[in-house]
Amino acid sequence: MAQTEFFRPGNLAAALDLLDQYREQAVIVNGGTDIVERIAHGGVRRAAIIYIHEIPELRGIGEGDGFVRIGGAVTYNDILASPLCCQFTALEQAVKEIGSPSIRVRGTPAGNLGTAVPAGDCCAAMMALDAEVVAASRQGERAIKLADLIIDYRRTALAANELIREIRIPVVPGGKTASAFLRLTSRKGQDIAQASAAVRLTLDGDVCRHAVIAMGSVSKVTVRAYSLEKAVAGKTVADAAEEIKAMVPAEVALRAADNPAFAARPTANIERQYKESVIGVIVARAMMTAYGKILAGEQ
Amino acid sequence: MEKLDIVGQSKQRVDALVKVTGQAKYSADLRRPDMLIAKALFAKYPHAIIKSIDVSKAEKLDGVAAVMTAKDLPGRNGYGILVPDKPVIAERKTKYEGDPVAIVAAVNLDTAEKAIALIEVVYEPLHAYDDPREAMKDDAVKIHEQHPAAEKGNILCVLKLDRGDVDKAFAEADIVIENDYETPMVDHAYLEPDIAIAELDSTTGGLILTSAGQAVYATKRCLAPVFGLPQSKVRVVAPVIGGGFGGKEDSTLDVCAVAGVLALKTRRPVYFELTRAEVFRTTGKRHASYIKHRLAANRDGKIVAIDVQTILDKGAYVSMGGTKAPLHGVTMRTLVYAGGTYAIPNARARAYSVFTNHPYSCAFRGFGAPQVQFAVECQIDELAHRIGMDPVAVRTLNMLKDGDMTITGQIMKESRGLGLGECIQKVTQRIKWDQPIDHGKGPVRRGKGFGAFIYGTGIPLAFEGSSAFANLELDGTLNVAVSSTEMGQGIATTVAQLAAQTFGVKYESVDVVFSDTGRSPDSGPTVGSRSAVMVGNAVAEACRQLRSRLLEVAGKQFFQADPSTLTIKDGLVYVEGRPENAEKVATIAARAFVSQVPLSVIGTWFPPQPTFNSADGQGEPYHAYGFGAHAVEIEVDTETGVINVLRSVLACDVGKAINPAIVEGQMEGGAAQAVGYGLMEEPIMAAGVMQNTGFHNYMIPTTKDLPDLESVIVEHSNELGPYGAKGIGEPPLIAGAPAIRNAIYDAIGVKINIIPLTPRRVLEAIRQQAGQAR
Ligand SMILES: Cc1cc2nc3c(=O)[nH]c(=O)nc-3n(C[C@H](O)[C@H](O)[C@H](O)COP(=O)(O)OP(=O)(O)OC[C@H]3O[C@@H](n4cnc5c(N)ncnc54)[C@H](O)[C@@H]3O)c2cc1C
């Protein structure tokens, strides 16, 4: 193969031009914490590397039209330093635990969505928060709901000439709504989730009016746990949590039939059993944390 | 007694500055552009017959300097520290996935990798053995069709220990506790991957090997036949090393052999570095163990007998696993420590070392002791719970005291240091053992656990001993040379302190040369928690000789005094008590130099010769033993199985801490490694193929997984150690894992006898017990 060219466009328009020119032959590098390893070890080889991490238009955090808007090159550390972002407890909790300090200083939520692996912590948090991305190309922009963005293992709905310019999280009035994220890892630092859950809970008195539940690392993509959402609706939070604990939600998909890549691993069976036995606990605990947030807010 | 002002101080390490400023040169830093790059084609199947190898396409590739298969080797196709059973390049058969099938040297890495990809090998795969219990069966396929040392089939050796009347003791005992235990194979997870540079020695016509290895002399002896060279023509140098933990005693042979034969073939310098995945797949591991432990005791808590069977996963080659006499390696340790640190009158132990298709099991911090002492420390806890006695009290009741006999028949002596009692006392005090812990009510429960250990200082083989070189320079500075390696453990600093203290110059006036067979005599390998004592004694002996020579000259030619009335301190010589009339060491050295007084000295030290009979396990394998106690406080999440270590308090009897900061470093490192060993570290093997070959899926603890690691130094002097020292390199690892396991029992009443205690394993055990209770 020919040499790889490295581009560092100074602004968004230049980046979009390059993307439009190279399309499938290009790879976007943002913080680089995921993709650089794959470029270095030959897993990804493209004619052009387009480095977008320092584009000023992508580094902002703001608010408008009922959304918190997070630029496509905003880092995890930027998020943690932003009260606007940290109002979403699920996001704050997800970001806090990602990787290590050296990963959080460069890694980005946009890169997390772009990677689209089931262990992506932001994928779960953003899904529960009902986020959407603004995909930009030279031809214009479109909004894509998170559930529509992640279409398969390591595959997004982005076109080859598009990038994530912004992630938008709808601001829901406080008081009766709060969110939380929880993950289980094999060790406490620098590890990815064995199972994770993000929950956004809306109360009606003591009763769950509505819960959005996203789960990570239990399928080939981040999934909404619709079955659990249905199961908890109308119940007190304590009852709902107790019930969920012992459940293996229908959306958990770790068996060979629906997850050939995972099931090919020699250890798949024992991993699956463990994930199935803890996912309910993780969701229940995340829900209880969100519940605790609401109660604390009421005081 | 002599007042110590250098020994016993936490002097700044001699290598501290260059390491923290990034200037220290590790092996990889010594790579030059003129070097060829080597790569190995490793076995595709861990157990297979090699039908054919075609290297013709690789050879034709531009930039390839050499492609070698077994038939192209210059000397013996076999090496090993104890038995030369590991081929440089596999010839007829592969026995694990780390066997090279062909090797390549090329102008750059890219070309070498391409050449490797062009080599075509036809294999006939055979059943690969993961479990020694399966491999030792009569009908198992022999992994080594012919092995120079194997006793029977895949059984490399069976070692035995017998003392007293075990059957009678079991028959008469009030209580018998019998359990099966399993401990994992573990990777050393050293930061620096294995590297070798081989170049022709233009003066001798031989080879110079530069490699991160723990045993430069052993490397030379093992590999000279591989190169077809006399040992005198092989020089081995180890630069500073990025961690070894026992692994680089062996793995250095693997990379040196490949680089060396390629350098001889191409007549050019060759650089060979393993990738991390290759380090995982191909280098040695800790021996996994399967232990059946029976313990008999009386109702008062006194242990009367043990009966222990240990099956060790030998992996593909002997390495440091050991054979029957005289080179009994790791296997022998599982007998010696089968009863832990307790006085037990009747003992039977059997140790089976069995070949499998795993990476060869080698030396790893603790050398068999962490395996059997895990079992012992779990057993003794269970004994305590059965008879309703405090687990620490049972240990104190049974521990080896002055005059007691070990199960190998060795009498313990306080004069060699027996500090376990004090370790136990200090640890229990610190962790407030006698105060009840709040176990908690919700899903997260708390518990406390305890473990103790014993560990001999040095190598229990007949050759144990060291030589070191000391040269007094004419400006009053001192050069010391040892063949020990500096792998972060601090031996160069310890040696400098011992030399400065013994001779009488400032610490800053001593420089230490290490790990170069061309520049120092043989101080032995840097293993077995031996160096501070064995090498330290040899250095001290050299310095004592220099000192008395210098005092002789000073007495005669300067002070007109009996040398015994003189002293040397901080580089000054004077009549004891009269420092105002001092002469500089440099002045006296200059005079000595012109008086035909030799100022270059070899010091040697040999401990009482170790004995061990592998037919009955009796003997005195070590001159002294280190001891320790480890207590932890943990949290168990009963709904996820996650263990959180909240506190770790470790006390070690080190005889004398020559540099307390270095000793604490060893203790903290050991305690951290114990958390990994106890909770998470485990190669996942499937038919001989390792599944987790990167640090993202082979888990070792991060700082977030560790509590503040509390260390308490206890000093019960060893009359034969330098300033009373005993070994401390390996022992801190031993008791942590059983302490964690015992704490889980304390927290939730669930007993788990397999480590690592991964969340999955813990949760499974909890649910199983709950299921049985229902
Ligand atoms: C040691 C370590 C620990 C880690 N721990 C975690 C963890 O705990 N949890 C977790 O979820 N992840 C973890 N990761 C993975 C990774 O860091 C994250 O997924 C991170 O969010 C990636 O962000 P990045 O900016 O570095 O992405 P990059 O590596 O730059 O890119 C990742 C992918 O996204 C695409 N991309 C990036 N930005 C955009 C954009 N604006 N528009 C379109 N496509 C884009 C890239 O083309 C690429 O395909 C870890 C990684 C490492 C190395």
Image (cartoon, rainbow, N blue to C red):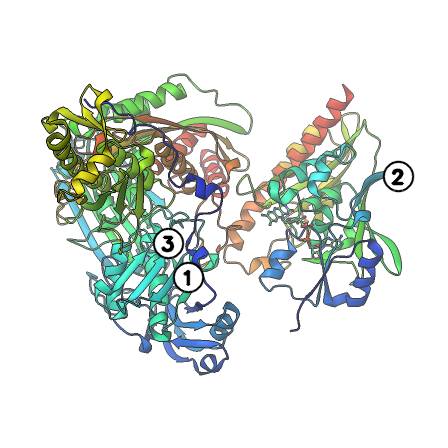
Q: Label 1: chain?
A: B
- Picture quadrant where residue A296 is located: top right
Q: Nearer the viewer, mark 3 or mark 2?
A: 3
Q: What residue sits 71% from the left and 51% below the top? A: A111
* Residue identified by numbered label 1: B687
Quarter of the N terminus of chain B within the rendering: top left
Of pointers 1 and 3, the one earlier in the residue sequence: 3
In this rendering, the answer to whether A200 lies above or below B272 is: above
* Residue identified by numbered label 2: A64
* Mark pair 3, 2: CA separation: 59 Å
* Kind of element beneath mark 1: loop
Respond yes or no on whether mark 2 lies under 8 Å from ligand 1: no
Residue type marked 1: Ala
Horizontal side of A72 relative to B193 (left or right) equals: right
Q: Are marks 3 and 2 in contact (CB under 8 Å)?
A: no
Horizontal side of B555 relative to A15 (left or right) equals: left
Percent across and percent down for residue B356 are 33, 60
**Total label count?**
3
Percent across and percent down for residue B136 are 27, 59
Percent across and percent down for residue B635 are 49, 30
In this rendering, the answer to whether B254 lies above or below A123 is: below
Q: Nearer the viewer, residue B93 or A243?
A: B93
Q: Which mark is residue B212?
A: 3
In this rendering, the answer to whether B645 lies above or below B597 is: above
Q: Which mark is residue B557?
A: none
Q: Nearer the viewer, residue B63 or B560?
A: B560
